[in-house]
Amino acid sequence: MRVLSYLLTVVVSTALTLGAALLVALQLHDAPAPLLIAAATGTLVLVMGPVLVGGFAGYFDHRASVEGRRYLRRWFLGVVVLDVVAAGFVVAASVTANAPLWVPAVLVVGAAVLLVAARPLGSLFRRTEAPIADTVDGLLPGRDAIRRKVVRIAVTFVVAAVLATIGVVLAVVLWGERGTDLGQVVLLAGQLTFLAPAVAALVVALPISRALRDVGGRDVGRLRRYAQVVLRGKRLELDPAERPAAVQYARIVPLALQFQLAYLGLLYLSIAFQLLSSVVRGSLVPVPAVTIVLLVLVLAWVVPTTVRHIRRARRYAAAHAADVTDPAAVGP
């Protein structure tokens, strides 16, 4: 049920984002290019900002510590500020494009409704979870469990590739697609082929993410301290009771980050097919062009940073294995 809710959130938020972007493209195309780009980017903020707030409320327990409450409050206020700025860009683009009044009203009021509902829905989702285990031992997935997760991603890729190939063959045989039209079908098939295993990578990594969160008692403040010590190498003093959990965090977080890299790589390949399709159609307008630059910059920053964090976590786990009561709990 929780996995279904997670998938439903991804599908609905993606649909809302694409719908808002389509509305901007159809109704605000007469706005100046800078305002159009800002409004299109703002629609992403208007949708994903509330999703982020709801995700934090559903993932972490704000009652766990004062530090955690303070951190979540800062995130909420930050999202509110970004939403206000994004709404301003949407309104400005609507005015300059002489768009109907209902266009900015739908986008701004819709974002406000999402923002108001985000935290209560997230808290309701969190209360459906099982209690945290009494001990952090055993939270690290075994090699067989990890192997099964990788196999599921690979099987999803193979199935998606087979179905996409069948779709291309049907397009040629039944509809007689040729030339550029056939190329579009092939590119769409490639996009879906990599998107399916990307979603699979997210789903199979959910238990690892939950284990990582449970190590910190679902307290975002404590998890931030672990991240600062384990991933960033900061010299913060941990309580004796927190040190075994920090080692467990150091053992689990590389797995979570590796699946994150797998998801990112598959998603980028899917996006590459989509952008290549735009190039073939000759419809690579300024908004996607700016998006390409942003995607490249994000990838150039995320990949080396993530690899560096994985290495630091492994070094920390090896150096502090003695902090764990049961040495076997930190894995091989």
Image (cartoon, rainbow, N blue to C red):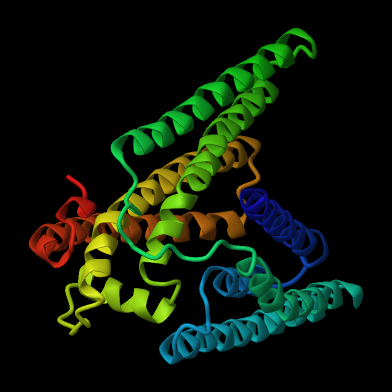
Q: Position of residue 18 (x, y in %)?
A: 71, 55
Which residue sits furthest top? Answer: 173
Which residue sits furthest front? Answer: 134
Q: Position of residue 161 (x, y in %)?
A: 55, 22
Can you say whether 189 is above or below 177 in the image?
below
Q: Is residue 104 left or right of residue 178?
A: right
* Residue 44 seen anywhere in this rendered image of the structure: no
* Residue 63 seen anywhere in this rendered image of the structure: yes
Who's the residue at 67% across and 86% down the image? 84
Who's the residue at 58% across and 84% down the image? 76
**Residue 302 sits in quarter:** bottom left
Along the line of sight, the residue nearer the viewer: 171 or 220 = 220
Q: Is residue 221 left or right of residue 24?
A: left
Along the line of sight, the residue nearer the viewer: 103 or 72 = 72
Q: Position of residue 251 (x, y in %)?
A: 25, 56
Q: Position of residue 206 (x, y in %)?
A: 49, 51
Q: Is residue 320 left or right of residue 180?
A: left
Along the line of sight, the residue nearer the viewer: 75 or 60 = 60
**Residue 281 sits in quarter:** top right
Q: What is the total number of numbered labels drawn onto the structure image? A: 0
Along the line of sight, the residue nearer the viewer: 99 or 194 = 194
Instruction: Give the position of the C terminus as an image quadrant.
Output: top left
